[in-house]
Amino acid sequence: MPTDAGNTAWILISTALVMLMTPGLALFYGGMVRRKNILSTMMMSFALLGLIGLLWVLYGYSLSFGPDRGGIIGGLDWIGLRHIGQEPSLTYATTVPHLAFMMFQAMFAIITVALVSGAIVERMKFSAFIVFSILWFTIVYCPVAHWVWGSGGWLAKLGALDFAGGTVVHINAGISALALSILLGPRKGFHEKEPMEPNNISLVVLGAGLLWFGWFGFNAGSALTSGGLASSALVATNTSAAAAAIVWMILSWIYRRPTILGTATGAVVGLVAITPAAGFVPPLAGIPIGIIAGVVCYYAMLFRAKKMGIDDSLDVWACHGVGGIWGALATGIFASVAINPSGANGLISGNAMQLAKQLLGVAVVCGFAFVVTWVLGKIVDVTIGLRVNATEETVGLDISQHGERAYGGMLR
Amino acid sequence: MKKIEAIIRQEKLDAVRTALEASGYFGMTVGEVSGRGRQGGLTLQWRVGEYKVDLLPKIKVEIVVLDEDVARILNVITIAARTGEMGDGKLFVLPVENAVRVRTGEEGDNAI
């Protein structure tokens, strides 16, 4: 098929939008940690723009989207961008240069690895994080992306729907984050209930804003065309974010005061939940999807803090794992071929089977992500060690890992 | 000469400053400090639930006064800073060996 100018423009812009989400995530996470760890937290996102940005063009794209090997993984035929040129691919985004589609997908891989970091901030050694990221990207992200989105991927063939990455990005990152935070153990002072004061909630709000902004590229860009479907996905996306933000604001208000930290968190879980559904469900399905995401993630976070006793420090499991699972199931409930003929009908349109397929996709990716992350984390732990020593943790990772401090100097 | 260190509520700084000025003491050093006393902690909200911070933000005002003014100034600050609730703060009086005005080199009482 020839290249379409409008579609190409939209995918190029969407690539830039999704790219901005990673620095946005760095602000979102960085503002929530203690002031001695803000730079190390931001670095765990920002450095991946470099690291995964390279690995993706070298071999990641080929493993994820290259010619299928048994439904499990892409072949190495496209390694180093071989056969990826200015002409559209025959299988993916067939009206857009293959290079543009490849780079659009790179941004998803980058932010997915960055999402995991929220669980292990303030105590994981940076060198260990880099090694873990390389392993996790190669052995967890690329295969799962292939199963769900790759041509011939086994979950794709089965008919599990994931419009923009509910399973590949959010469940994958959220469950892996849980496994890694259990393996790493809690921060010093976590069980003693030492206050872990966010150093700058304004940065969290700015980060949430950039995430929301970039998510239009994430979800509406995943239409891979610039027409009606992209518009429908964009409206669903904004509607779900809006609904979940308001729900979280109300829940924090009922608790005591309407917090902006809560409202920003709500917006993000609304965006997470609509991600797999955005281009398969009617735009107004964003309202129930967002409302339920707000409630479910709020209580998941309470449960994690009060009952599980696991220091998933920035609640990657509660936001992305739980929000992603709800989104995947919601896709099986609200999907309609009237919105997207290449999708499927969900429960409401009379196809209960779709919900079962979604459930299977969720279960498989949860199990795979948890077990493999555990094994990879263990390997890094026994070889180079996952954790900084007690003194480095007390001093803070900004100084001990990076030799920098965020708020330096006196008087100016 | 005596130094008065006044730990007061943040919202009482303006009242204390005005009262001191009216009592003839314009100069002062002010800092933001954290501390704890009988008031107990501060409860802040997290994304869900809350956490407690037991060091509260306070203001420390430092002034150096003539020996004969100590009682009067302590009274002025006490009245200006008081709400009657726990957390109003505390005043400390310390002896001061000497003082020097940097611009002129004046020493002792003339320097304050």
Image (cartoon, rainbow, N blue to C red):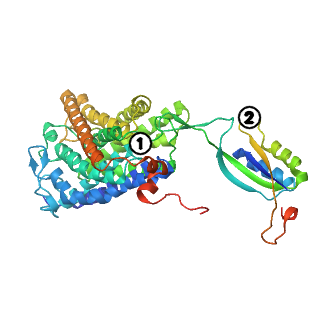
Residue B75 lies in quadrant: top right
Residue A101 in the figure: left or right of residue B66: left
Cα separation between marks 1 and 2: 37 Å
Task: Say which amino acid is labelled 2.
Answer: Glu
Chain at numbered mark 1: A
Same subunit, labels 1 and 2: the answer reads: no
Label 1 crowd bin: few (<14), some (14–19), many (20+), radius 10 Å: many
Q: Which mark is residue B85?
A: 2
Q: On the rendered image, what quadrant is the C terminus of chain B found in? A: bottom right
Label 2 crowd bin: few (<14), some (14–19), many (20+), radius 10 Å: few
Residue A74 in the figure: left or right of residue B83: left
Residue A91 in the figure: left or right of residue A396: left
For the question of whether residue A60 can be seen, the reply is yes
Q: On the rendered image, what quadrant is the N terminus of chain B found in? A: bottom right
Q: Position of residue A213 (x, y in %)?
A: 39, 51
Front one among A266 and A410: A410
